[in-house]
Image (tube, rainbow, N blue to C red):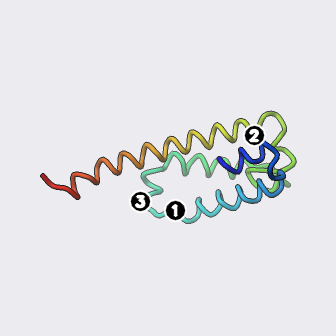
Amino acid sequence: IITLSDLECDYINARSCCSKLNKVNYSSLHLMRFKKTVLHLSITNNRGVTYIMVPSGNMGVFDPTEIHNRGQLKSHMKEAMIKLGFHLLCFFMYLYRLVPKIAPK
């Protein structure tokens, strides 16, 4: 989200922004553990379909030549906020389930 907002304010150029975002997305897709993958199947499925649908010749999901076209920057920001909300919700659900196990009555 911070990288996309820096791009929106022209603090960084599109090429460095896209290379950072593609590096983070590819590494997080391959390094997920099995249990996390099963629990977060919807996010994993979305990432897999997104990578399959990348046009040939593009740098990755985030392409510096197309990130400003057709409002893609706004859609990427919206998608990042939705993923952040999903992960925050999962974090608090896990925390809610963990507290009774740590502090018994």
Task: Name the residue located 76 percent from the left edge and 55 percent from the top edge.
Answer: 60
Task: Name the residue located 83 percent from the left edge and 55 percent from the top edge.
Answer: 15
Relative image position of residue 44 (x, y in whole percent)? 55, 51
Give the residue at mark 1. 32
Q: Which mark is residue 35?
A: 3
Judge by depth and name the residue closer to the eye, 11 or 56.
11
Judge by depth and name the residue closer to the eye, 64 or 47.
64
- The amino acid type, in three-letter code, at marker 1 is Met
Task: Name the residue located 23 percent from the left edge and 58 percent from the top edge.
Answer: 102
Q: Mark 3–mark 2 contact, CB under 8 Å?
A: no
Q: Residues within 10 Å of mark 3 (few under 14, many from 20)?
A: few
Relative image position of residue 105 (x, y in whole percent)? 12, 51
Give the residue at mark 2. 73
Relative image position of residue 10 (x, y in whole percent)? 82, 46
- Does dot 2 land on a helix, a strand or a loop? helix
- The amino acid type, in three-letter code, at marker 3 is Lys
